[in-house]
């Protein structure tokens, strides 16, 4: 059981599950039918592979990070899994190209721009290492790290599900006000989780002179000047929208719960936590948010 739990969280399977749940939430909250199984499978695969890349390509060396140690011990199996996932992703991608070639061909340029924006941000986060540009990585801009991750995640789980829905049903894609607000909500929520996650790497980032927000401001300011105020603002914006658009009290309460839990978790970070607290509790808030949004939309 212990090995299975480590595989789920260290192997980033949990992130793939969160991507599926948040993508389902995006459709349901916008009163749209769910996408087909293939969309959620591809979302799962690309999320797992993307997060694994950083550890698979990491140069071997002495490390006290339990996650890095786990990857070193299971590298061969992880690479085999990656090969299988990439073959599966390629087959699924080829099928989609064959099935919806004409619908993709006639997409407006602004939709294509939107489609490519999020992968570009994700790629630049890891960086480009070429002799013509030397090494460039958005991850090196410490304060920007959490917002790049939040932006990429929000595109995957908020924008792509709706674009896919429109393509597979041959209807035009338009960004609605609700869709935009859901994107902003996911962007801010996940960015706040990423800032909390940076607390884990405070000592390493400080020694490497990587100016993350946690390194620049310190733990207390991060919690009480950044995380809690921005979460309260996000919560207030949602309440204002919900109350003016006739949301039921149950729906408002269900969507308020993740914000309250985020504030609670941020406050708890004053104490030192082990890596599983970050992976299960902090990242787990993404899953909680998705479930609350789904239940709130389906029940009332």
Image: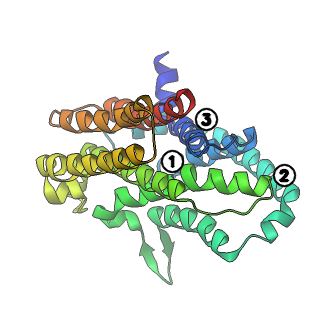
- Which residue extends farthest top? 1
Residue 32 sits above or below residue 218 on the image: above
Foreground disc of the pair 2, 3: 2
Answer few, some or many: residues within 10 Å of disc 1's Cα (few below 14, many 20 plus, some between 14 and 19).
Answer: some
* Residue displayed at 75% across by 44% down: 88
Q: Nearer the viewer, residue 291 or 16?
A: 291
First in sequence, mark 1 or 3: give its number.
1
- Which residue extends farthest bottom? 132
Asked whether residue 198 appears in the rendered view, the answer is no
Foreground disc of the pair 1, 3: 1
Q: Is residue 171 left or right of residue 292?
A: right
Answer few, some or many: residues within 10 Å of disc 2's Cα (few below 14, many 20 plus, some between 14 and 19).
Answer: few
Q: Secondary structure at mark 3?
A: helix
Q: From mark 1 to mark 2, how far is it between C-alphas? A: 25 Å
Query: What residue does disc 1 label?
Result: 51
Query: What residue does disc 2 label?
Result: 95
First in sequence, mark 2 or 3: give its number.
3
């Amino acid at each position: 059981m212990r090995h299975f739990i480590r595989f789920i969280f260290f192997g980033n399977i949990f992130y793939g599950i969160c991507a599926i749940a948040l993508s389902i939430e995006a459709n349901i909250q916008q009163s749209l039918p769910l996408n087909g199984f293939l969309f959620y499978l591809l979302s799962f695969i690309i999320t797992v592979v993307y997060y694994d890349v950083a550890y698979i390509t990491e140069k071997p060396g002495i490390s006290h990070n339990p996650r890095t140690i786990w990857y070193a011990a299971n590298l061969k199996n992880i690479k085999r899994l990656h090969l299988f996932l990439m073959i599966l992703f390629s087959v699924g991608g080829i099928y989609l190209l064959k099935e919806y070639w004409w619908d993709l061909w006639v997409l407006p340029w602004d939709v294509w721009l939107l489609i490519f924006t999020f992968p570009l941000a994700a790629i630049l986060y890891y960086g480009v290492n070429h002799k013509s540009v030397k090494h460039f990585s958005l991850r090196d801009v410490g304060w920007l790290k959490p917002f790049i991750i939040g932006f990429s995640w929000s595109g995957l789980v908020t924008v792509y599900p709706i674009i896919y829905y429109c393509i597979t049903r041959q209807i035009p894609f338009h960004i609605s006000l609700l869709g935009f607000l859901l994107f902003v909500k996911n962007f801010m929520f996940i960015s706040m989780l990423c800032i909390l996650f940076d607390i884990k790497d405070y000592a390493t980032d400080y020694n490497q002179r990587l100016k993350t927000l946690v390194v620049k401001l310190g733990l207390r300011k991060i919690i009480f000047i950044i995380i809690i105020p921005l979460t309260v603002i996000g919560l207030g914006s949602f309440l204002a929208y919900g109350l003016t658009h006739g949301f039921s009290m149950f729906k408002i309460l269900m969507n308020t719960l993740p914000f309250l839990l985020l504030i609670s978790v941020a406050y708890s970070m004053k104490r030192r936590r082990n890596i599983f607290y970050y992976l299960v509790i902090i990242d787990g808030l993404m899953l909680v948010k998705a479930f609350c949004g789904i239940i709130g939309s389906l029940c009332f």
